[in-house]
Amino acid sequence: MTVNQDMSILSLVLNASLVVQLIMLILLLISMASWTTIFRKWYSIKDAQEQTDSFERDFWAGGDLNTLYQRAINNRGEDGGALERIFEAGMREFLRGKQQKGLTDPTLLIDGARRAMRAAYQRETDALESNLALLASAGSVSQYIGLFGTVWGIMHAFRGLASVQQATLASVAPGIAEALVATAIGLFAAIPAVVAYNRYAHDIDRVCIRWESFVEEFLNILQRQG
């Protein structure tokens, strides 16, 4: 086998020790899981932003609240958007309170709508943040897993020198190189996960702030009607 073949990435992976190969396989699975989460989370955040924009345009266009509420009820089987579901929860509780006999205190009506929208807001936030912890874990753990593979590979390479009478750079270089591949794979799995987690956490915070602002503004409208 030539030197170029020995030092190729594929050859280094195939000739690595069993422990290092297992670590590389674990890192590959982590990378695949993180990239799957990255693409799925990108689509879900993009849909949440577009649906929030669409509902806010319809809401602030000055339409009738009952018409929007009926449309939200009709969209239950479909994905009408998180903000529409938050609006539906608050409006449903407000109308239910107005229909109850003896419940005439506007403060109680608004408190009921606030609790309903807060519960719906929390459910939507949890759904939007789902699997985000996987990216955080992949970004923080992958590099250390790769480092462990590197340390193990270097130990394996130096143990192999014990049976060699004259140690040279050519004899130890392949073992060290294959060990460093584990670190490279760990960084390949960690860096995209960290970047995506920071970006998505920022985007989710912005969307949630818009939902919170809508809840407060909608409560002011209900208070005037109540």
Image (cartoon, rainbow, N blue to C red):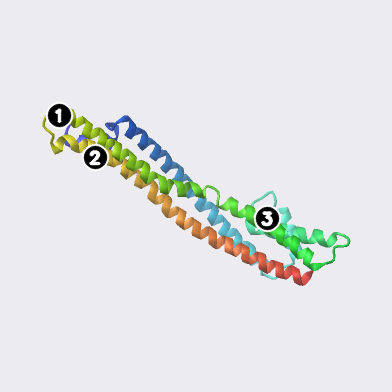
- Sequence order check, earlier mark of 2 and 3: 3
Q: Is residue 189 among the parts visible in the rendering? A: yes
Rounded to the nearest whole Å, what is the CA distance between mark 1 and mark 3? 69 Å
In the image, which is nearer the foreground, mark 1 or mark 3?
A: 1
Which residue corresponds to mark 2? 177
Q: Tell me whether circle 1 and circle 3 mark residues in contact (CB < 8 Å).
A: no
Total of numbered circles in the picture? Answer: 3
Q: Nearer the viewer, residue 55 or 90?
A: 90
> At 13% from the left edge and 34% from the top edge, which residue is drawn?
167
Which residue corresponds to mark 3? 119
Question: Percent from the top left, x then y, of residue 14?
Answer: 29, 32
> At 11% from the left edge and 32% from the top edge, which residue is drawn?
166
Decide: is 193 above or below 117.
above
Give neighbour class at mark 1: few <14, some 14-19, many 20+ (Cα, 10 Å): few
Return the residue found at the far left: 166
In the image, which is nearer the foreground, mark 2 or mark 1?
A: 1
Which residue corresponds to mark 1? 164
Return the residue found at the far right: 101
- Sequence order check, earlier mark of 1 and 3: 3
Rounded to the nearest whole Å, what is the CA distance between mark 2 and mark 3? 54 Å
Give neighbour class at mark 3: few <14, some 14-19, many 20+ (Cα, 10 Å): some
- Disc 2 marks which amino acid? Ala
Which SS class for mark 3? helix
- Disc 1 marks which amino acid? Val
Return the residue found at the far top: 163
Decide: is 99 above or below 141.
below
Task: Assign the N terminus to one quadrant of the image.
Answer: top left
Give neighbour class at mark 2: few <14, some 14-19, many 20+ (Cα, 10 Å): many
